[in-house]
Amino acid sequence: MDAEPGDAPTVPEVSHHPTRWARLRHQWNQRLQPGEQATVLAWASFTLTFAGLRALTHWIRAGHGPSGGGISLDGKHFHHYNLGIGMLATVAGVGLRGTERQRRHPAAAVAYGAANAMIVDELALLLDLKDVYWAADGRESVDVAVGCIAVGATVVAGMPFWPHAHRALRSGR
C-alpha cells in the first residue's frame, strides 16, 4: 500500500531490549566504583600490553619487522621501557595537574597499565644494566609468572563485576 500525500511517515519499530554491550556497561557502572573500574582497566591493559610486547619481540627476533631488531635513534637501540617511562611520566602529569575528569578518564588507567607493562617487560635489563633480554636463564619462567600475575590481578580486581558481566552477556533481555 502506497502512502498518500499528507500521511505521516512510518517509524520503524525499535526494540526496547538493551543490547549485550548496554547490559554489560550497566553492570560495569553498577558493580564497580570508579577506582575499581580504573584498577581493572589498568591490569587488563598491563596484561594485553605485556602479551603483545612478548609476541612482538619474538616476531622481530625471528627476523621479521625492522632490521636491527627494533627502534634505533642515532645508531642507539631504543628500548620500549623508555616509552613506558615517558607514558608513566605523562600519566603522573595528568594525575598532578589534570582536571578531575581527565584523572578519572579510562585512558589514564589504560595508559598506566600499558606503561608499567613496557617497563616490567624489560625489568631484567634495568636490574642488571646490561641487555640480558634474550638470556636463557629463567626468562621463560619470568614470562609465565608475570603473565599469571597480570591475569590473576585483573580477575581479582574485577571480582564484584565478573558474575554480573557473565549474566548480562548471557541474558536475552
Image (cartoon, helix red, strand yellow):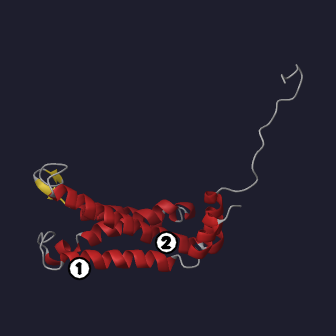
Q: SS of the residue at dot 1?
A: helix
**How many numbered circles are shown?**
2
First along the sequence among labels 2 and 1? 2
Q: Which residue is mark 1?
A: 141
Amino acid type, residue under disc 1 in the picture: Ser
The residue under the point 17% across, 48% down is 66
Q: Which residue is mark 2?
A: 40
Q: Is residue 99 above or below residue 71?
A: below
Question: Marks 2 and 1, Cα distance to the nearest angstrom?
Answer: 25 Å
Is any atom of residue 64 visible in this view? Answer: yes
Q: Residues within 10 Å of mark 2 (few under 14, many from 20)?
A: many
- Quadrant position of residue 91: bottom left
| Residue occupying the far front of the picture | 1
Residue 37 location (% of width, % of height): 54, 70
Q: In this image, 122 relative to 23: left or right? A: left
Residue 82 location (% of width, % of height): 25, 62
Q: In this image, 35 relative to 2: left or right? A: left
Observer-nearest of 73 and 24: 24
* Quarter of the image with the N terminus in it: top right
Q: Which circle, 2 or 1, is nearer the viewer?
A: 1
- Quadrant position of residue 8: top right
Q: SS of the residue at dot 2?
A: helix
The residue under the point 68% across, 61% down is 172
